[in-house]
Amino acid sequence: MPDTPIAYCGAAPLPGELMTVWNLDPVLLAGLGVLAWACHARATRPGAAWAGFALAVLVFVSPLCNLTSALFSARVLHHVLLTAAIAPLLVRGFGLERFAIGGGLAAAGVHAVLMWLWHMPGAYAWGLGSVPGYWLMQATLLLSALWLWSVILGRAGGAALGAAAASFIQMGMLGAVIVFASVPLYGAHLLTTAPWGLTALEDQQLAGLLMWVPAAGPYMAAILWQVMVLLREDEPAAGHA
């Protein structure tokens, strides 16, 4: 048996039963209802806000939630969507970039510390096996990502570019650490991956690749956008000279 209970998303599913397992937690659904109301009544860019809402339903309500109990790679996909897709969409959708506070490297540093912390085997096991731990994991990752993306999307220049670049680098480094680990690190998944055709180590390597390559995409896009903004700002000065 796994070395920790699976608390919130349910026991690890088998492939044939996955599509029957949806998370209908009333508290979660109430929270999503509040978010849906906000998307309708308070969004400054409704398209982005509703896209963030749809992805939130995917990661918390759909069978993906239950699949994260079986596969570490599904859990990493959940975290990637939460921090690199839902967070920037909510920032844009609700205009949160107007309220960016603090320095870019501070935001990137706090988010990086939390990403690395929650992917350490001990903290990960607690987050997977405890309802308070699960929601603390989700809240801290999302809130730190909202802060980070508010800086990246709300400012131009060194602070935003540095935050995007630092996040790109740290995500790649964390992914590489997971990919090149020679043994399975996450005991909760030692006996849950076989029905899905993966060993625990293969599942872990897939998770690392997800974090190393696709997860870096939004940060690379932000870097390129910030570079283009800086180049456009330099053009008038060059023309005037």
Image: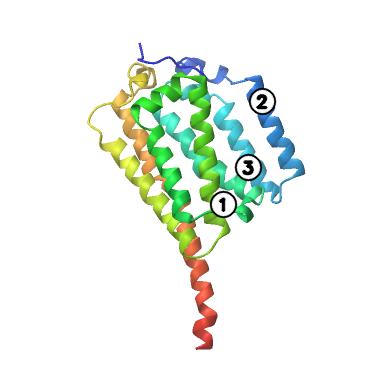
Q: Is residue 227 above or below residue 149?
A: below
Q: Is residue 82 above or below residue 63?
A: below
Please state if 201 lies on the left or on the right of 188 as rendered: left
Q: Position of residue 222 (x, y in %)?
A: 49, 56
Q: Is residue 173 above or below residue 29?
A: below
Residue at horizontal 38%, vertical 38%? 116
Q: Earlier in the sequence, mark 2 or mark 1?
A: 2
Q: Nearer the viewer, mark 1 or mark 3?
A: 1
Q: Position of residue 176 (x, y in %)?
A: 30, 41
- The amino acid beneath tag 1 is Ser
Circle on res. 29? 2
Residue at horizontal 66%, vertical 29%? 31
- The amino acid beneath tag 3 is Ala
Q: Nearer the viewer, mark 2 or mark 1?
A: 1
In the current view of this chain or complex, which residue is farthest to the top?
A: 1
Which quadrant holds the N terminus? top left
Q: CA distance from mark 2 to mark 1?
A: 26 Å
Residue at horizontal 53%, vertical 64%? 156
In the current view of this chain or complex, which residue is farthest to the right?
A: 41
- The amino acid beneath tag 2 is Leu
Q: CA distance from mark 1 to mark 3?
A: 17 Å
Label 3 CA crowd tier, 10 Å (few <14, some 14–19, many 20+): some
Q: Position of residue 74 (x, y in %)?
A: 44, 29
In the rendered structure, are the residues bearing label 2 and label 1 in contact, judged by CB atoms less than 8 Å apart?
Answer: no
In the picture of the structure, the residue carrying the numbered disc 3 is: 51
Q: CA distance from mark 3 to mark 2?
A: 17 Å
Residue at horizontal 36%, vertical 50%? 169
Q: Earlier in the sequence, mark 3 or mark 2?
A: 2
Please state if 16 lies on the left or on the right of 210 as rendered: right
Q: Secondary structure at mark 1?
A: helix
Q: Nearer the viewer, mark 3 or mark 2?
A: 2
Please state if 113 lies on the left or on the right of 131 as rendered: left
